Amino acid sequence: MFSLTLPTLWSRRLALSGALLLSLLLNACAAVDPAVYAKETPKLDLRTYFNGTIDAWGVFQDRSGKVVRRFTVTMKCTWQGDVGVLDEDFVYSDGTKEKRVWTIRKLPDGRYVGTAGDVVGEAQGIASGNALNWKYTLALPVDGKVYNVQFDDWMYLMDDKVMLNRAVMSKFGIYLGEVLLSFTKR
């Protein structure tokens, strides 16, 4: 009986590992290149848009699409040369408050790097046309534990006042949910 169970267990583990690897490969192949937005207008310049006060409204949807958290954000944004500070104050629908302060550095060729207290390492960004793609790992507290979650974050400038943001969250390549935001510049 033991010999029948062990191969079955290994077969299941191998099948699960194969499915996970295939999922990771498909996700890697499905990435959109920011260059596809090169001709889109208005052209996004973070130093111009994220300068002054910005208000945002957002939701977090779990993997089923259910909205599990709503929030507002007030951002105070300043730049000195190629270095910007985005001071974000979040207020969630349950009354919880949170603060995140980004330091962003503009690099050549539309690239940006950013850091914040709960970002693991550096966020890497590429702007092209009206879009910006950020990729980063966020240390996300959930029920007393902290999980490192990957974000594939896209921002689209609609006009000089409005920007839309969609961030897909994953862990080990497995889809966890999305954050949707609408920014309005005062």
Image: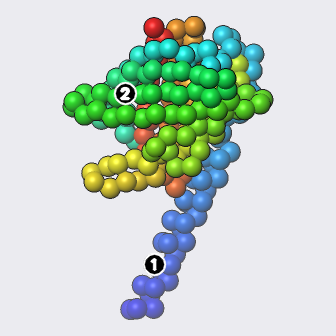
**Closer to us: 75 or 38:** 75
Amino acid at the residue labelled 2: Asp
Name the side, left or right, on which 63 lies relative to 143: right
**Closer to us: 1 or 63:** 63
> Residue 61 placed where, x, y %?
37, 34
Amino acid at the residue labelled 1: Leu
Figure quadrant of residue 113: top right
Name the side, left or right, on which 70 lies relative to 31: left
> Residue 135 placed where, x, y %?
59, 40
Name the side, left or right, on which 20 lies relative to 56: right
Q: Which mark is residue 89?
A: 2
Q: Residue at x 57, y 53 (%)?
A: 23
Q: Would you name the residue on which mark 1 appears?
A: 9
> SS class of the residue under badge 2?
strand
> SS class of the residue under badge 1?
helix
Q: Quadrant of the C terminus?
A: top left
Nearer the N terminus, badge 2 or badge 1? 1
Q: Is residue 17 visible?
A: yes
Q: Is residue 180 visible?
A: no
> Residue 48 placed where, x, y %?
61, 14
**Closer to us: 154 or 111:** 111
